[in-house]
Image: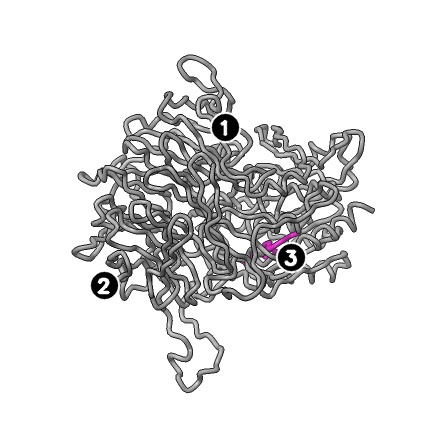
């Protein structure tokens, strides 16, 4: 399932980037906070990889302390290390409580705040441990035969819910024990591969008794069933939840396999009875939802019980097969089974949410006009949405702490740090006027940041930012070819001189329906592009959330249509500026952005002088057959290419980039990972081969050990160096 923001890659992605839960323990130099020295105030690949990356955040039960994790990376060691920190709720007395090469992550307060539980691989596998808040008295709590990937203790502290993989597919050795060295994989149905793995296991939720020292009576909630919970590839413990009474577990599951799994996004919320066993489907108890809409046929994920136990909420998509459908906030009355959607006043996705302490309102994260902010909606008044934060930032994760909200925040100019949003109970929430910067609060136009003051609590990478000059980030509204307004982010080089002319890059977003918000990336980082003296043009083209449902849905079945015209609008408008060198324009992008680059290469009418496509779709017909999530292909492409009477599908495949190679005339760099099973590496190889056969200058960067993302430090540095060497070759002559 695609999450609509990069925050959204959960603990699974963090574990992958750390080299897995079984990464070697104490071997090699200790990886910790970098003391890197940077020359010239310019961002470099080494500076990016030197930055600590804040992960999980947990507030203590008395709301006086905060525990959190940080991942540190080493380019020479080509791996990372996770450490844990504790600070006071106001950011004071910040202390690192682990300092070793074991992977400590996912801190959680237990035993009334006297202990911190966490995952650690010190024993050789990922298990649950505990320690004092000062890091002393470490003790292993679980001895499970396998890796524990996520966990949550019950509110009464007597049970442990955890995630672990179970075998679902027979191996070749199972079928043929006399062939133990045979490597062939026998496939009989779809979903045999997913994103970056051959599917042989599924994550299952387990419930165990906990006596304070260890676990017993371990029960697999999905015992004997081949289904996933949480769902691959990004689902974690957020897809499961304890009831306040510790008697129920809600979990997310799509009870499908093979072809049925491959063509459907219909996951549901189930409730497991801890004492009696068995579970019920909370989404499909009746034929219709209480508001008269079709019963939840798309993704239903991430359940949370209200503090008083009367309600359960989850994120819900309406339509099966549409992974980028509007993500609504559904609330069910547990006594009556009545379900209703309480985010109807917000015409964008609910990306994450959190119950208020009074169980009468819900905080949520959502993107609007290129910025992910914190909002609130009430159970009684669900037509009005109230905004708590503002500014050119994206917020991520939320936790209540006294009368404050603890959240991570990032922007195009700064990676994640932890912030406090204060005074939640001192003033009424201001009514949000979407599309404006004014807020109606007691008949006055008071800026929201004055109502809820924001305080930065961590300064994880201050020593690096203090050495860097960041480029200015500017939002521009541009008129599109069909007369609408499009927000485009412009990022300028440090020490920008309007009297100079700069090479300029058009950035093409992936997803295809992921927002160009104030995101921070450790690869597609706009500030490092700007530091190399490029102006970056990043449009929120058709097909992105945060501008209403119509804008978001306009891309499905129209890959070569209005979204491409939007790209031309963005670069053509910026090319009018005297400081943009229109003879030195480049175009770059990944995933759908890579498809965009390949498509634009055959249609750009000599606008661009260089292209870079990462993990892009080159041949649409082959992509339809090769990709694993068929629901995505069916919805966005409109159907199969052999459906000759399907006008939408035929338009899609008629716009396949490989059909326009005869018009390619511009140097192109193709990048792809061979473990990318979403868009197979042969797409990048074919594009490169086509360019060479056409006599177009081309280069191929292929990664045998990377997937849809580049996760290893040295590969990441290689990516950056190759990226800029290519652009400089063609745009800085």
Q: Mark 1 or mark 2, which is nearer to you? A: 2
Please tell me which residue is depicted at 41% across the width and 31% down the height of the picture: 375
CB atoms at circles 2 and 3 under 8 Å apart?
Answer: no
Magenta segment includes 619:
yes
Q: Which residue lies under the disc numbered 1?
A: 390
Nearer to us: label 2 or label 3: 2
Of all residues, the one furthest to the left in this rendering is: 276
Residue at disc 2, secondary structure: strand
Region rendered in magenta: 613-623
Marked residue nearer the N-terminal end (1 or 2): 2
Which mark, residue 671?
3
- Residue ranking furthest to the bottom: 178
Whole-Å distance between the Cαs marked 1 and 2? 48 Å
- Per the model, the C-alpha gap separating discs 1 and 3 is 36 Å
Are the residues at dot 1 and dot 3 in contact (C-beta closer than 8 Å)?
no
The residue under label 2 is 217
Q: Give me the C-alpha separation between circle 2 and circle 3.
A: 49 Å
Question: Quarter-wise, where is residue 431 in the image?
Answer: top left
- Which structural element holds mark 3? strand
Residue 297 percent across, percent down from the top left? 33, 47
């Amino acid at each position: 399932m695609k999450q609509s923001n990069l925050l959204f890659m959960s603990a699974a992605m963090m574990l992958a980037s750390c080299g897995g839960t079984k990464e070697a323990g104490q071997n090699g130099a200790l990886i910790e906070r970098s003391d890197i020295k940077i020359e010239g105030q310019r961002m470099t690949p080494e500076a990016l990889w030197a930055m600590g990356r804040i992960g999980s955040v947990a507030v203590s039960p008395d709301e006086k302390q905060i525990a959190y994790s940080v991942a540190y990376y080493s380019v020479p060691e080509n791996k990372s290390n996770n450490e844990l920190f504790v600070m006071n709720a106001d950011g004071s007395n910040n202390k690192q409580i682990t300092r070793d090469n074991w992977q400590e992550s996912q801190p959680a307060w237990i035993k009334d705040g006297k202990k911190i539980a966490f995952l650690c691989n010190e024993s050789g596998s990922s298990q649950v441990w505990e320690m004092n808040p000062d890091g002393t008295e470490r003790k292993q709590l679980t001895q499970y035969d396998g890796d524990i990937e996520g966990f949550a203790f019950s509110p009464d502290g007597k049970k442990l819910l955890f995630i672990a993989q179970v075998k679902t597919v027979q191996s070749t050795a199972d079928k043929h024990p006399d062939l133990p060295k045979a490597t062939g994989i026998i496939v009989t149905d779809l979903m045999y591969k997913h994103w970056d793995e051959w599917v042989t296991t599924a994550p299952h939720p387990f419930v165990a008794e906990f006596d304070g020292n260890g676990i017993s009576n371990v029960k697999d909630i999905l015992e004997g069933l081949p289904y996933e919970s949480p769902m691959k590839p990004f689902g974690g413990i957020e897809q499961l939840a304890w009831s306040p009474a510790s008697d129920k577990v809600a979990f997310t599951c799509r009870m499908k396999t093979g072809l049925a799994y491959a063509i459907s996004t219909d996951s549901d919320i189930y409730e497991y009875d801890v004492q009696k066993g068995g579970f019920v489907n909370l989404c499909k108890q009746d034929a219709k939802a209480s508001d008269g809409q079709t019963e939840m046929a798309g993704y239903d994920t991430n359940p949370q019980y209200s503090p008083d136990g009367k309600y359960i909420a989850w994120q819900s998509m309406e339509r099966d097969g549409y992974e980028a459908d509007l993500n609504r906030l559904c609330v069910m009355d547990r006594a009556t089974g009545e379900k209703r959607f309480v985010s109807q006043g917000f015409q964008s996705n609910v990306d994450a949410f959190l119950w208020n302490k009074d169980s009468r309102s819900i905080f949520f994260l959502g993107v609007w006009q290129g910025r992910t902010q914190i909002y609130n909606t009430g159970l009684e008044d669900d037509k009005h949405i109230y905004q708590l934060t503002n500014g050119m930032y994206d917020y991520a994760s939320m936790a209540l702490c006294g009368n404050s909200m603890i959240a991570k925040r990032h922007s195009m100019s700064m990676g994640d740090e932890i912030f406090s949003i204060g005074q939640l109970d001192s003033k009424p929430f201001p009514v949000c006027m979407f599309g404006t910067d004014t807020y109606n609060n007691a008949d006055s136009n008071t800026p929201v940041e004055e109502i809820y003051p924001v305080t930065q609590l961590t300064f994880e990478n201050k020593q690096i930012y203090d050495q860097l000059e960041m480029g200015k980030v500017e939002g521009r509204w541009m008129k599109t070819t069909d007369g609408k307004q499009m927000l485009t982010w412009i990022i300028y080089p440090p020490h920008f001189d309007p009297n100079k002319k700069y090479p300029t890059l058009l950035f093409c977003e992936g997803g295809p329906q992921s927002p160009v918000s104030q995101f921070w990336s450790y690869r597609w980082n706009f500030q490092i592009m700007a530091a190399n003296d490029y102006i970056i043009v990043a449009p929120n083209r058709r097909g992105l959330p945060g501008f209403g449902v119509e804008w978001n849905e306009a891309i499905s079945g129209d890959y070569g249509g209005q979204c491409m015209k939007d790209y031309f609008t963005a670069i053509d408008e910026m090319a009018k500026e005297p400081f943009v060198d229109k003879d030195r324009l480049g175009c770059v992008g990944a995933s759908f952005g890579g498809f965009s680059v390949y498509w634009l290469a055959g249609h750009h009418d000599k606008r661009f002088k260089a292209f870079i496509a990462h993990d892009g779709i080159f041949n649409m017909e082959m992509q339809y057959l090769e990709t694993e999530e068929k629901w995505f292909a069916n919805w966005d492409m409109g159907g199969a290419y052999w459906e000759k009477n399907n006008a939408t599908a035929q338009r899609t495949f008629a716009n396949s980039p490989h059909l326009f190679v005869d018009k390619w005339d511009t140097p192109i760099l193709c990048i792809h990972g061979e473990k990318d099973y979403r868009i197979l590496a042969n797409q990048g190889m074919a594009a490169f081969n086509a360019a060479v056969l056409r006599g177009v200058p081309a280069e191929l960067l292929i990664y045998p050990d990377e997937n849809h993302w580049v996760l290893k430090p040295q590969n990441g540095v290689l990516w950056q160096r190759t990226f800029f060497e290519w652009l400089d070759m063609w745009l800085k002559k």
